[in-house]
């Protein structure tokens, strides 16, 4: 528009100038809205940074080239370019700046609004609103006229808000190690280019001398020739974009704990599992805890649980508990039955734009912008037509059928790891509710005797149905409860292609109460062992999760080993548990039999956790072919014969050494026979053990060291040096 004015050298009427400036602002706002809609739902990636970087480099080249190759100016009387070439170049630079502003805003939006809370969404909208307010305030004003005083306040508020939003760097947690390096380079390069643009526009070659007769306005950027609101808005976007890019680059480069903080919600959700399993006989309390868990863990703003109860004939799920919303409002917000049917196959449903789905009745602004629906059991499991698979620790069993609903107020608000954490939580919640239903049903029918029979069946399903297979490793396990249900627990999980986690735990006491805590241990191990790979780190997480839920005087002892077949090592940590037996070929210089007694407190003895972590020691065994290890509970060594004599650690170690060359299955069977012979048909305590035998992979065997035992120790959580 300035091209025509420059040719005529006549300033437009004020109303026309206002309309033209606002037309430019509206066009850019429309372009921003269209690009946001086109990219909705796409997760942040390296392209999110590379696209604005390329555009910014192009704009910097254009502005610097125009400034160095052309000497223009502005008439202080008419506020118009002195010549037609200046006006044309102003239009070119202004168009380029407009494209850059839209590109930077569209790139920043998914980064800032990843896992958005209501406050963050409001802050982003306020940032965009302040930019529009700046444009309206400057619309129609000549470039030679000093800006109104309110503009300084708007500019300061916009920059401060942009700086505050620069702290939102949670998107970096989803990047791998290589991606973090590339993203850091892109972010810092973008920050440098945007800073260069600010310099070029304000004090560099891309400025035009101008005056109003008094020297109050010294120079303006080329973009202001096209539209003064566009010039001011572009400068604000460039400054805010530079701040955010610089903050992102520093977070990625310095290794700030964004990734760790990003897992806080997952860890909180996993700790809620203890709360769920601690009320196995109270279905309403469990449902309330399930609804409360995702909100307290920061994985959602609203949550509600819909359950059916086939025992009472209520087949259709109904909302029975809610958090952040009333039960009545939750039931009215969605078509509960339709959405519950949608997840009957066991797959979670994610509605990124929930308000556009016909099954969602909530109005816009009601807090249901995104909705995750997680299955709590399936129709087939509820009918009893197919037995559940408890080997994965996440399937629902028994009579439960329904869904967990988790909502956030904005669209595209759930990241993939959010959904993964919710699925883990929902799986354990379904398991806990199912156990409650099973026990309650048994109590109603036959009271304690039938309840214990059913509990034994449920507990049996908690043990691994199949042990993962890793080349070079033989594993066999056995458990022998003293009653129908017991408090011993073992599990074996695959932590990688050649890595296994082996756990043996013993809950204080016996019977149903111990079995309940054993179920809690199952939930934390299946989920927590994959988050904390080191033995000491997992035991510390288990202590934090289970400790607050254990009754007064109750505790759990545990031994956890991580076997890495590629490295041919076994790392071990004990939480107040019996020592692990290691038997090695005595023909080797480092051969022999040892009881590995690394220090550690039992889970639940230190609820705060500091003393627990300080006392914990990790031991590492450099494995040799033929090495045999035995992890077991105290029922094995404390078994008494008819004369009252204990079996004892020495007798057990000698037995393992004597049969060390047998395969794991044979050694397990021999040890079971030995235990039955010693303790008789009715043992006094639960007995559980796992045999781990390393046969090697057939490669060259390193020369043995003469040291004995072949074990190294280190604190699981080293104390930092004093300052």
Image: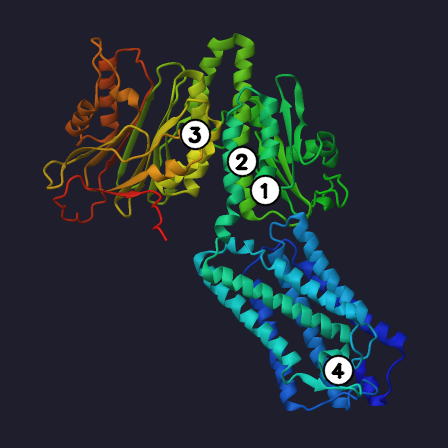
The residue where tag 4 is placed is 217
Q: In the rendered view, does 295 fall on the left or right side of 664?
A: right
Sequence order check, earlier mark of 2 and 1? 1
In the displayed structure, 155 sits above or below 429; it is below
Q: Residue at position x 54%, y 21% from top?
A: 436
Residue 14 visible in the snapshot: yes
Marks 3,4: beta carbons within 8 A: no
Whole-number angstrom distance, CA of label 4 to CA of label 2: 62 Å
Position of the N terminus by quadrant: bottom right
Closer to the N terminus: mark 3 or mark 4?
4
What element does badge 2 sit on? helix
Q: Which residue is mark 3?
A: 521
Colour scheme in use: rainbow
**Residue 357: which numbered mark, if any?**
none
Quickly name the residue at label 1.
299
Q: Nearer the viewer, mark 4 or mark 2?
A: 4
Tag 1 secondary structure: loop
Write down the residue under mark 2. Answer: 425
**Where residue 244 sits: x, y (%)?**
59, 63
Among numbered discs 4 and 2, the one appearing first in the sequence: 4
Q: Could you classify mark 2 by the number of other residues whose Cα lies within 10 Å: few (under 14), some (14-19), or many (20 or more)?
A: many
> Which callout, 4 or 1, points at the residue further toward the start of the chain?
4
Q: Is residue 666 rendered to the left or right of residue 7?
A: left
x%, y% of residue 63? Answer: 64, 81
Measured as percent of width and height from the top left, residue 387 is found at 49, 24
């Amino acid at each position: 528009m300035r091209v025509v004015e420059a040719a005529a050298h006549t300033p437009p009427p004020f109303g026309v100038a206002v309309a033209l400036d606002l037309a430019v602002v509206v066009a850019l706002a429309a372009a921003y809205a269209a690009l946001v809609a086109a990219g909705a739902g796409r997760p942040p990636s390296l392209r999110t940074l590379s696209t604005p970087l390329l555009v910014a480099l192009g704009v910097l080249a254009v502005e610097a080239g125009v400034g160095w190759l052309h000497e223009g100016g502005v008439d202080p009387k008419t506020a118009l370019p002195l010549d037609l070439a200046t006006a044309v170049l102003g239009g070119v630079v202004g168009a380029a700046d407009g494209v850059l502003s839209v590109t930077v805003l569209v790139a920043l939006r998914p980064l800032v609004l990843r896992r958005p809370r209501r406050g963050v969404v409001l802050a982003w909208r306020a940032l965009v609103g302040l930019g529009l307010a700046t444009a309206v305030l400057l619309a129609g004003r000549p470039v030679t006229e000093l800006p109104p005083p309110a503009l300084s306040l708007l500019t300061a508020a916009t920059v401060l808000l942009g700086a505050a939003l620069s702290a939102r760097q949670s998107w970096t947690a989803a990047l791998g190690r290589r991606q973090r390096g590339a993203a850091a380079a892109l972010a810092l390069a973008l920050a440098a280019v945007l800073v260069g643009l600010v310099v070029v526009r304000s004090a560099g070659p891309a400025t035009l001398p101008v005056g109003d007769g008094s020297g109050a306005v010294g120079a303006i950027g080329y973009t202001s020739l096209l539209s003064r609101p566009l010039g001011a808005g572009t400068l604000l976007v460039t400054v805010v974009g530079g701040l955010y890019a610089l903050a992102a680059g520093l977070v990625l480069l310095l290794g700030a704990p964004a990734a760790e903080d990003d897992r806080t919600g997952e860890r909180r959700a996993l700790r809620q599992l203890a709360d769920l399993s601690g009320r196995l006989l109270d279905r309403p309390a469990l449902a309330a805890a399930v609804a409360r868990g995702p909100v307290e863990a920061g994985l959602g703003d609203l949550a509600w649980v819909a359950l059916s109860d086939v025992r009472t004939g209520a087949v259709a799920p109904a909302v029975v508990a809610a958090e952040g919303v009333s039960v009545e409002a939750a039931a009215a917000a969605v078509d509960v039955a339709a959405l519950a049917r949608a997840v009957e196959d066991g797959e979670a449903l994610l509605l990124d734009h929930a308000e556009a789905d016909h099954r969602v009745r909530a109005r816009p602004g009601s807090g249901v912008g995104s909705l995750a629906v997680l299955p709590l059991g399936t129709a087939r499991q509820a009918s009893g037509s197919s037995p559940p698979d408890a080997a994965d620790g996440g399937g629902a069993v028994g009579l439960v059928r329904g869904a967990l609903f988790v909502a956030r107020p904005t669209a595209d608000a759930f990241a993939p790891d959010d959904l993964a954490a919710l699925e883990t939580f929902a799986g354990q919640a379904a398991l806990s509710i199912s156990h409650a239903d099973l026990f309650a049903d048994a109590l109603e029918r036959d009271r304690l005797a039938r309840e214990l029979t059913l509990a034994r069946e449920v507990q049996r399903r908690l043990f691994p149905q199949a042990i993962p297979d890793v080349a070079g490793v033989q594993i066999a396990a056995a458990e022998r409860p003293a009653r129908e249900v017991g408090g011993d627990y073992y599990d074996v999980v695959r932590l990688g292609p050649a890595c296994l986690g082996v756990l043996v735990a013993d809950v204080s006491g016996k019977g149903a109460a111990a079995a309940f805590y054993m179920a809690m241990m199952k939930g934390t191990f299946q989920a927590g062992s994959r988050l904390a790979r080191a033995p000491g780190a997992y035991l510390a997480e288990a202590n934090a999760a289970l400790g607050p839920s254990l009754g007064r005087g109750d505790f759990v002892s545990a031994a956890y080993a991580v076997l890495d077949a590629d490295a041919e090592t076994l790392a071990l940590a004990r939480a107040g548990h019996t020592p692990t037996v290691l038997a090695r070929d005595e023909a080797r210089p480092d051969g022999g039999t040892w009881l590995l007694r690394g220090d550690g407190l039992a889970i639940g003895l230190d609820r705060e956790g500091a003393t627990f972590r300080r006392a914990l020691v990790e031991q590492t065994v450099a494995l040799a072919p033929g090495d045999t290890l035995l992890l077991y509970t105290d029922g094995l060594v404390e078994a008494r014969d008819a004369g009252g004599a204990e079996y004892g650690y020495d007798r057990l170690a000698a037995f393992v050494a004597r049969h060390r060359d047998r395969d794991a299955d044979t050694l397990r069977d021999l040890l079971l026979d030995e235990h039955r012979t010693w303790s008789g048909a009715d043992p006094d305590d639960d007995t559980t053990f796992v045999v781990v035998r390393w046969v090697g992979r057939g490669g060259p065997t390193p020369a043995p060291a003469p040291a004995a035992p072949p074990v190294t120790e280190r604190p699981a959580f080293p104390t930092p040096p004093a300052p």
